[in-house]
Amino acid sequence: MKAKCKACNLRKLALLLCIFSISCAALACGPKEKTLPEEEVKMILSSPAFKEGERVPVKYTCDGQNISPPLAWGEVPEGAKSFTLIVDDPDAPTGTFTHWVLFNLHADSRELTENISPQGKLPNGALQGKNDFGKIGYGGPCPPPGPSHHYHFKIYALDQNPDLKSGTSKEQVLQAMEGHVLAQGELIGLYGRKK
């Protein structure tokens, strides 16, 4: 009888270990923020208007002219065919808020001047998606009164031109980029409004 119980206990323990392993694997495979593998190149994205961690000038917000800031980036890996730029605010009360989606920017480009026109197709061939204000092009920081929000300006070098139309959402652009990112860079600016 004791030997039988011992066998039952061993089976129960094996079953529990199996369930634990499956649970751990499921948690490890759950949805995560997409990150680049370490071997991929990091690009340097900068702006003459503000430095990393500095306040975004009022001119580039809804409290000013609400125009896009100038941006510049360095060399990119061989094989890059286009750039995608995404600007969002993860501190927004309703979840991450998208301020700008620009894609299919030619691989020879190394900068964007300020005040990019809010049109679907730009003269340089790049396309713009829809922001969370429901408009095409750039929509500047416009947080509710309170602590400063962090505005993430992210640039991606791709090995293709995503086959998408202007007015596309950030989610659709990210989906089309999957598996095609060669390098990326990020610049974070802050902006807050007093109560």
Image: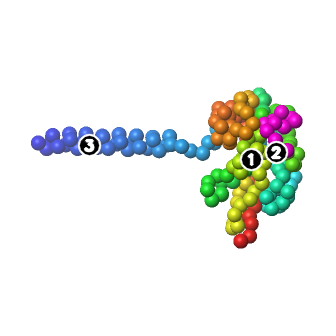
Chain part drawn in magenta: 117-127
Spot occupied by residue 40 in the image (x, y as percentages of width and height):
69, 36
- The disc label shown at residue 22, or none: none
Q: Residue at x 13, y 44 (%)?
A: 2
The residue identified by callout 1 is: 135
The residue identified by callout 2 is: 118
What secondary structure is marked by label 3? helix
Q: Amino acid at mark 2?
A: Pro
Separation (CA) of disc 3 from disc 2: 63 Å
**Left of 18 or right of it: where is 169?**
right
The one nearer the camera, 162 or 185, is 162
**Left of 8 or right of it: where is 27?**
right
Relative to 119, say whether 97 is above or below: below
Please name the predominant secondary structure of the magenta segment in the image.
Answer: loop
Q: Residue at x 77, y 51 (%)?
A: 139
**Left of 109 or right of it: where is 176?**
left
What secondary structure is marked by label 1? loop
